[in-house]
Each structure stands twice: as structure tokens, then as C-alpha cells.
Image (tube, grey):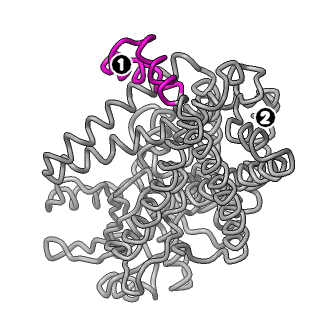
Amino acid sequence: VFLKGFSEAIGVAVVLVATYLGLNVVVVAVGLGEVISEPHLIPDWTAALTAEHGNPLMMIGIALIVFPKLALGLSGFETGVAVMPHVQGDPEDTEEKPAGRIRGARKLLTTAAVIMSVFLITSSFITTLLIPPAQFQPGGQANGRALAYLAHEYLGSAFGTVYDVSTILILWFAGASAMAGLLNLMPRYLPRYGMAPHWARALRPMVIVFTLIAFLVTWIFDADVDAQGGAYATGVLVLITSAAVAVTIAARRAGERGWTIGFGIISAVFVYTTAVNVAERPDGVKIGACFIGGIMALSLLSRLARVFELRVTHLELDDMAQRFIRDTANRTIRFIANEPDSRDLTEYRQKKEQIRADNDIPAADDVMFVEVTVLDASEFESSLKIRGEVLHDRYRVLTLESSSIPNALAAFLLHVRDETGQRPHIYFEWTEGNPMANFLRFFLFGQGEVAPVTREVIRAAEPDRARRPHVHAG
């Protein structure tokens, strides 16, 4: 009801979920009926608990200790978060205030949480009372399939088989929904930072990659449900724990003391649960570390391979900047790359004199200063905003805002060439320091040895040497 698009997929999902919920309702209802029809079950169970654990406080303590082992039962609570970007908002929603989407997401998550909580509690209750403990052990018929065991035991093999098939289909759908969440999240982050190849924005290649990963994990664990369950539980707990901590921080920043305390307690419970689960079943952390390491390594290689791309999505000049370019269109266009420091009269005068002397620029030729301010070096692509201003009543300065100095200058020079039909000149000073250290500064922070990198970006963007802007360094 709350999702937009994917009409065919949602149709299939509705049928699968409705069927699975219906079958579960039947099994749980029959199980509760059996418990009610045999009144000795509950007294026997409570007597066994009292005899083994003494008092209710001891039971609660044991339950807290055992809780991490039951973490896999929380699976599903986290998948609702993955589909939140697909929730339909109101027509008047904006990116800053998506009130309709938030309202719809709250309904979606609340509905899912209520349904799952009811099923978890009731199914745990009836399976504990109706299934012999030995059947829960590894190799037992109820191990990993307690409700299916009850379906076969109390409703016959035909119904049990239908329940088994429905379970397989709903698990397939759960995997598909998790993949849909990944397909929605991945293109939002890694490509934004240049840490993924271009094909990562396309759905089909990513589907193939995630499918192969799923096969690989299944192969590594020999298709063992218990082994994969430990790794999956770790992933679920990490997601829920990080969300709980994030909400606690948000409540604290909002000054909501009561909510902060409440969410803080919940966060502490999940931190403890995650830590115990990791200690008892480290497979999840090992696999997660391998994937994180692989993603980071491939991401860094991808960004390194694409470091000389133009990386400017849009270029915008204000009126003054356009006027500067028009005024120089009928003569040699010369720019001086300047690092904006104090921006006083002395800085510009000395820079201009030095560049003229180093490059033998005729005194009659006019020059303009170009200054780039790095906003966020982690952004791989960015738009380029160019403003023109006259400083100290004599120096024309073009100021650029971008995520990388060389890429911004290269894009600007190519734009000037296209607008004026001339190949502009730009003049740099050599940067002091180790070249490798300067390259790393550029790779990480968008700064460093600007002159050769600017030239390399231009070379990569313009294969025709006769059309490339001139880059001078002295």
C-alpha cells in the first residue's frame, strides 16, 4: 500500500506474503488450540522453569544471557528500513521535508513490527510447549524449522508440504528484498565518492554481482543453515545496533531527555547482544570483514583509476565572470592560478610580477587570476560555480568552488576554449615538496601538485593535442 513503482514485483510480493501469513496464522492458531486443549502443558512448563531456575529474577537473568542466541529471530525488522526510500510521499513533499514519506514509512514499519512481534511471541510459546527439546538439537526435525514441524505434526503432510514450499518462496523473496535494498543504497554512496565504476549505477550488473556473492557465501558455508544463520544474525544485530545508537544521538541532539534515556537503554542491550553474538559466532564478523576489506580495496582502486576524469557535472558562471571572458575573447587569454591566502594587494602584485618574469609574458598582455576553493574533497563529482570580482580596484579574479582544484581548472579552461574559440593559457608555480606526497594530497584532499595534474586531466578529456588549453609551470 505504501510503496511506489515495481507494480509487478509488489503484486507477487502481496501474494507471497499473504499466503505465508495465512499459513502461519493457521499453524499458530492450531498450536494455541492444542495448548489450550491440553491444560497440563502450561503448569508443567512453569513448574519446570521454577524447578530449574528458582525465581523470576533468575529467569530474567538467564533470558538476558540467552538472548544473543535468539538474535536471528529479529531478522526482518531491519529489512523495512531498506525499502523506506520507496515509500510514496505526498505531492508537496520535498527532499528537506518529506513529511508524507515519513508518515508512510512509520505506518509501514509499525505494521510490520506489530505483525512480526505477535508471530515471534506466539510461535515461540507454542513451539516451546509442543515440541520435544531433543527435536531442536542439531539433526532434530525441528532444528531451524519449528513451525514447519508443527504443520506436519498437527495438520498433515499435505499441508506441511505446502507450508515448506511457501517458506522457501518467502525466504527467496526476503533475499530479493534485501537485494533491492542494496541496489537502492549502493549507487547512493560509492559512485558519489568515485569509489565504484560507472556500471555500479546500473541495476543489472549489480544484480549479477550480488547474486554471485550469495552463491559464494552458500558455497563457503556448505549450504549449512545453522552456519549461515550465525553470520546473518551478526549482520542483523549490527544494523539494528547502529540504528539504535543513531536514534539515541538524534534524540540527545534534539534535547529529548526521556527518549534519549529510553533509546540509550535499548542501544546498550543491542551492543551487549552484538558483542556476545560476535564472540560466540565469529563467522559473521570474518565474512563481513572480508567483504568490507574487498569493497574498500576495490573502491580505492576505482577512485585511483578515475582520478584524472573531468569530474564536473555542471558549470555555471555569474554575470561578472561571463563579462571577464567576453572582454578577453578577441586576444590571448591568460590566467594565473592562485591559492587564495590573505587576498591582499601585496599578494596579487607579487604573484603577477613573478608569473610574468618566470614565463616572459609581455607587459601589454592582460592576465586574470583564478582561485579554487575546495568544498568537500570526498565528493567525486560536483558542479562548478564561477564568480567574477574585481579586487583592490585593479585585479580581476575568478573564484571557483569545487571538490578538486585540478579538475575544476581543467573544466573551466575547456569551457573557456569552447566559448571563445581560443586555447587559453594558465600559469602555475611548481609546488614545493615530494611529488608522491603531493599526489597523495591531491588524491585524498583535492589539492597538491596542481600543474601536472591539471594538464593530465585536460589530456584525458581532450584527445586532440591541437585543441588543448596551454598549461605552463615555472
- Quadrant, the N terminus: bottom right
Amino acid at circle 2: Thr
Asked whether residue 456 appears in the rendered view, the answer is no
**Mark 2 falls on what kind of element?**
helix
Q: Residue at x 73, y 20 (%)?
A: 138
Q: Mark 2 highlights which residue?
A: 218
Question: Considering only vertical position in the picture, is 226 above or below 210?
Answer: above
- Most prominent secondary structure in the magenta stretch? helix
Q: Residue at x 35, y 30 (%)?
A: 269
Q: Residue at x 53, y 25 (%)?
A: 69
Where is residue 384? Give x, y as percent.
Answer: 42, 70
Question: Considering only vertical position in the picture, is 240 above or below 169?
Answer: above
- Packing grade of label 1 (10 A; few <14, some 14-19, many >=20) is few
| Label 2 – label 1 distance at C-alpha | 35 Å
Front position in the image: 338 or 312: 312
Magenta span: 42-69
Taking the image as shown, residue 55 lies to the left or right of residue 308, namely left
Asked whether residue 17 appears in the rendered view, the answer is yes
- Packing grade of label 2 (10 A; few <14, some 14-19, many >=20) is some
Q: Residue at x 39, y 50 (%)?
A: 429
Taking the image as shown, residue 175 lies to the left or right of residue 420, namely right
**Mark 1 falls on what kind of element?**
helix
Q: Mark 1 highlights which residue?
A: 61
Which quadrant would residue 90 be assigned to in this image? Answer: bottom left
Where is residue 397? Give x, y as percent.
Answer: 28, 71
Where is residue 169? Give x, y as percent.
Answer: 77, 54
Where is residue 418? Give x, y as percent.
Answer: 56, 82
